Amino acid sequence: MHGSYSKHGGMVTAPENEIPNQDGHLKFVYHKDGANTRCFRFAKTDEVAENPVGTFVLPTVASWYSMKGDGLDNANLRNKLNTYDYGLASLPTKDRAFLSNLNKFKP
């Protein structure tokens, strides 16, 4: 098993046993990476979470096929995400990119 995170269009992957975890869940940090950008990284061993609750949190995982919000049903929300102009950024989970990204970055 491995854990991965995206960073500025690339992917960083490490074996599960090299990534700090909490209750069996890999720990990641969303941090400032330079003056105007943010990205993910693996947490450091014994790193304290810098958030209001002071611990790493495991958010609810959103399903591409059941998510909805802001008055949009699932089909309309997916359509907005798939067709939005992200400028220089990208959304690697778009329908046309997701499977190729999984295959491109698998260990």
Image (cartoon, rainbow, N blue to C red):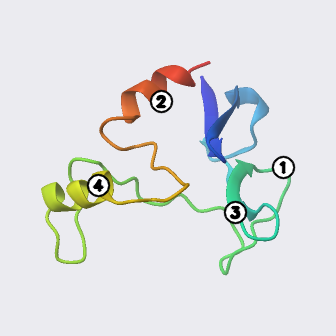
Tag on residue 101?
A: 2
Q: Mark 2 near mark 1, Cβ–Cβ under 8 Å?
A: no
Q: Mark 4 near mark 2, Cβ–Cβ under 8 Å?
A: no
Residue flagged by tag 2: what amino acid is it? Asn
Label 1: how many Cα within 10 Å (few below 14, some 14–19, many 20+): few
Residue flagged by tag 4: what amino acid is it? Thr
Helix, strand or loop at label 3? It is strand
Mark 2 vs mark 1: which is more N-terminal? 1
Q: Nearer the viewer, mark 1 or mark 3?
A: 3
Q: Is residue 45 left or right of residue 31?
A: right
Tell me the CA gap for discs 4 and 2.
Answer: 18 Å
Q: Nearer the viewer, mark 3 or mark 4?
A: 4
Q: Mark 3 near mark 4, Cβ–Cβ under 8 Å?
A: no
Helix, strand or loop at label 1? It is loop
**Which residue was labeled with disc 3?**
38
Helix, strand or loop at label 2? It is helix
